Amino acid sequence: MTDVKETKKVKMRKKSLLDIDFNDTSEISVPPRLIDQVIGQENASEIIKKAALQRRHVLLIGDPGTGKSMLGQAMAELLPKEELVDVLCIANPKYPNQPRVATLPAGHGARKVEMDAEVAKKSGNKRFIISLAILLAIVGYALIATAGNPAQQPTTLLMAMFVGFFIFFMLNQSRSRTEMLVPKLLVDNGKKDTAPFNDATGSHAGALLGDVRHDPFQSGGLGTPPHERVESGLIHKSHLGVLYSDEIGTLEMRTQQKLLTAMQEGKLQITGQSELSSGAMVRSDPVPCKFVLIAAGNIETTRNMHPALRSRIQGSGYEVYMTDTMPDTPENRRKLARFCAQEIVKDRKIPHFTREAVEEIIYEAQRRADKKGQLTLRLRELGGLIRAAGDLAKERGEKLVSAETIILSKTIARTLENQISDSYAEDRKLYKIFEVQEAQVGRVNGLAVINQRSGIVMPIEAEVVPAFSRREGKIIATGQLRIIAREAVQNVSAIVKRYVGKDISDFDYHIQFVGAYAGVEGDSASISIAVAIISALEHAPIRQDTAMTGSLTVRGIVIPIGGATAKIEAAVDAGIRRVIIPVQNKDDVKIEEKYKDKVEIIPVHYFHEVLRAALPTEYHYIANKYQELAEEFTEANNTSKKVKKTK
């Protein structure tokens, strides 16, 4: 009943999210070309069109789920039509370990192999008949020779059968020259009408560059001919097409060098990738591989790429940064409505969505963008929600997916990070790791996010003790802090030293991120650290029904952070009723309807405003003191600037 009420509120709230009229997504047309189905990546789409026309390589950098692989597949559709070829590997009688390579028009390669195999089969049948005749002849001769001597007949017959079966076995195990000359089809394009597209993500060197299988039987005529052990790589199967490789920086440098050679030469020999294998002795003729490379990854990928490989892409191709959000305009909302229709058509298992359900998806795109006036472009995750809602609708027997079903499916299709966050919250409530009632000195309910989507409450404690060192006090922070988090602690110490009205060099500051088992990164805990230290210095309790998040400059200005919506929702789930956030993040917040009446959001601009919101009323004099100190500092700064201008 509660869910139904919430759904009604949602419908009223989002009446004007779409400016087009339709009853359900079956009325929305889906473009036939993949390039026209790409949402929000107009710059990347234009570059892909240009690159396809001129067969240029492209490096796509961006977050997962923003459409990189879809652009790669779209390029295969856009490539100029060329005559595809089949590639054959042919035995080299003179130099067996150097198989030859030949190309035939697409479809002809398979027919060539079938014809030669038929000839070899006839030869094999003939050899079988001859070997069987020899076996019978030997056995027959033994019977005739021992006809007058019955005592020796069994022994002679057994020996004759042994010799006969041995000859029969050897003749059928050895292969005729005709059979050994049957070529192997390395690349078969007989059934393809468009340029090939191959996803090489995660492929090892052999799968990518080709390999030669190991042969344990290399003598006595029992071995497999070298040309039959040659295996083509994805670069060869992508000849005249597209080779897509996500996280290309994970490839070994040696593999990247060979990939670069293939891009430069348009052909690459196939040899065994393992030096311990007999395949390492085999090296084929160069196999054609004129492919277009679509390399993808994130910023870290560019650091792990071979410099020459990236230079090659820069010199004869394009580099594109994939955006993760797009402006929240009526046109882009219509694109998201079309995205819903596309996902339903692709899935083929889920019912269509009502208009209200599509508006709920658009609202979720606003929430996940985590920026005011933006829609998320991490559409793979949004597609997961669409499928989860469709599955739930099927289970409930709905002909169309409703907005209510979308809301219910959000609890089902929770990410791993969301589930971990829930587990953290339950464990911390159970063991009272954080408080939500009484005020405490030196303890703040900080907020953090996991993977930008799931919020958690992270208590931060501070204690001020006499300095151990005679020279000056130290800041000691624990909780597996990483680089940015450690630097944030140092910045906070500068603020405290400047604003505290007494000498603090005689103290050590111990800061603990309670329960930070997975480590802490980022500077969004800056205001929490500063409040905890000030509380410990001034012996002023902090309201535990309040959580906070925000970065802090050394001048005491609160600046925006990421994940504001997820953090606020996590605080409410933990029982916290007030959340302090940077004023710049105020319009980024898009919390669910069920949270709105349970939390007070307090936007702040200056550090003294944080103190005023976090401390009980009777301790507001501390906030006033810091405000006066800040104003004095600002006034002194302005006076200094005026003096300089006068001079």
Image (tube, rainbow, N blue to C red):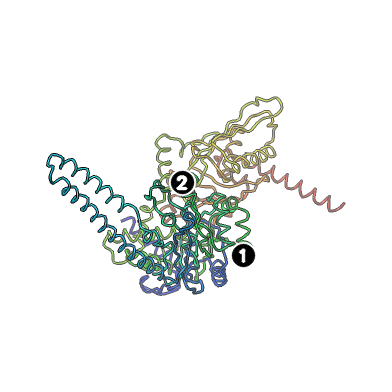
Residue 277 is labelled as: 2
Quarter of the image with the N terminus is: bottom left
Asked if residue 138 shows in the view, the reply is: yes
Give neighbour class at mark 2: few <14, some 14-19, many 20+ (Cα, 10 Å): some
Circle 2 — which element? loop
Give the residue drawn at x 27%, y 47%. 166
Image position of 198 (left or right of 602): left
Residue 316 is labelled as: 1
Sequence order check, earlier mark of 2 and 1: 2
- x and y percentages locating residue 501 in the rendered image: 69, 35
Give neighbour class at mark 1: few <14, some 14-19, many 20+ (Cα, 10 Å): few
- x and y percentages locating residue 542 in the rendered image: 54, 38
Q: Nearer the viewer, residue 24 or 585?
A: 24
- x and y percentages locating residue 577 in the rendered image: 46, 46
Quick one: which residue is furthest to the front in this view? 148
Image position of 57 (left or right of 380): right
